[in-house]
Image: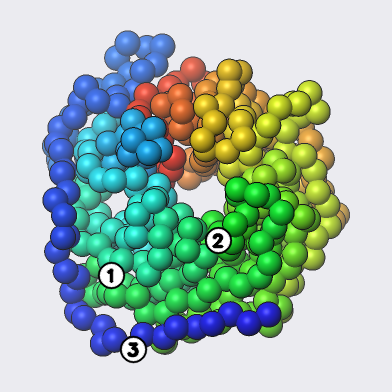
Amino acid sequence: MTSPLHSMDRRKPRTSAALSRRVMVSLPLAAVGALHATAPAAARPDTSDAVASDARRRGRSVAYVGSRTTAAREGKGKGIEVYDVSADGDTWTLIQTVELDNPTFLITDRSRRHLYAVHGDFTYVSAYRIDPQSRLLTPLGRQETGGRNPAHLAVDPTNRFLVVANHSSGTLATLPILDDGGLGPVTDLLTCSGTPGPHRTEQTGAKPHHVPFSPDGRFVVVPDKGLDRIFTVTLDPASGKLALGPVPSVAAREMTGPRHIAFHPHLPYAYSVDELRSTVTTYRWDAERGALQALQILSSTESSMTGDSRGGEIAVSPDGRFVYASNRSGAGDSSPGGPDPDTIGVFKVSSRDGTLSPVEWTSTQGIRPRFFCLSPDGRRFYAANERSHTIISFDVDRDSGRLRPTGQVVHTGSPVCVLFVE
């Protein structure tokens, strides 16, 4: 398989350019998106830097919530919302709103001093400075990604380059991270090549959806929904050039549409959530060669689920004992989903061979969980219900992996990503 590389040699500027469109940053917004909980005093808005700095000292964290905002996506969000989160996870206080179009995935750099957002259905990525005390965001500018509909992004281990998946264009892009945390123009583009899968509308060409680095940082692993393949790519940390790895890709089962992949924290296994079939595939990971070998495929939905479903997100618990996968009812983003709430599948990991066995399916108490995540300490689980406009909190049972609703609900428009920073 060949994959053309398009190199662009540009001198790295020292600082980033200003945003070419107006970005609205609002403070305070006590009445918008605050936590709705059983206790009436759950939300205590206060946006001063002094209070936010004091919260950091008391072990609190900040959650950055990205959303869909455009009418084409039936978005009800405003952009990136910044919440102060109490140490127990029960109280979320909105401290900032940055009004943007479709900031659909967020990540920080390795120093956690800067935040980057891709903008779904558009052609650019934006950069922000994170205040070290308050954790509030200041815009640093934006850059084109060389493609359309960037869906995911990752920072390389050297903290020099950002890797972006251009979902609709079928390309991967690298952008240099500048001295001030902003981004330079695209350094390189790699086109994902192959034969599209048989789904008439979802597999019209290459559709890379995820670009995480392998645990040792040597490879970028790229599930491609359109080609039914997972690519393994290398990044030259000096030049920012991308190339296919020694084992360029592995074929997934026909019409699975691999979407996201998660690595086991200490065993040689990885797990993909497959969007089109709502399955979870277990792979053996050869870290030396950057090769995946499929070992097992399980349904991510319970056996009583007879309607259409799409896989969404996948994660491995910090201790490596459990895998979680989200299920979104309906035949893709254009369907309304529901009427019943969607689910999270919980699976136990075999320490012997990495394979999975079902534990339970838990209701997300909402529709379209495009994203979920664990809290930094692994004790809480948060499901972002895009169509229900809620983030639902669960306690995680460390022994069984089961999820139990806490009763805490964050009401916010079309949430599609939650990023915690301590």
Query: For this view, does 150 lie left or right of residue 94?
Result: right
Pointers 3 and 1 in contact (CB under 8 A)? no
Q: CA distance from mark 3 to mark 1?
A: 15 Å
Q: Residues within 10 Å of mark 2 (few under 14, many from 20)?
A: many
Relative image position of residue 398 (x, y in whole percent): 66, 35
Residue type (three-letter) at the residue carrying disc 1: Leu
Residue 411, located in which quarter of the rendered image? top left
Residue 340, located in which quarter of the rendered image? top right
Q: CA distance from mark 2 to mark 1?
A: 22 Å
Relative image position of residue 269 (x, y in whole percent): 73, 60
Closest to the observer: 19 or 226? 226
Number of the label disc, if any, that sits on residue 9? 3
Q: Residues within 10 Å of mark 3 (few under 14, many from 20)?
A: few
Q: Residue at x 19, y 70 (%)?
A: 16
Query: What residue is pinned by disc 2?
Result: 208
Number of the label disc, if any, that sits on residue 183? 1
Relative image position of residue 132 (x, y in whole percent): 23, 54
Q: Earlier in the sequence, mark 2 or mark 1?
A: 1
Q: Residue at x 58, y 75 (%)?
A: 233
Q: Nearer the viewer, mark 2 or mark 1?
A: 2
Residue 29, located in which quarter of the rendered image? top left
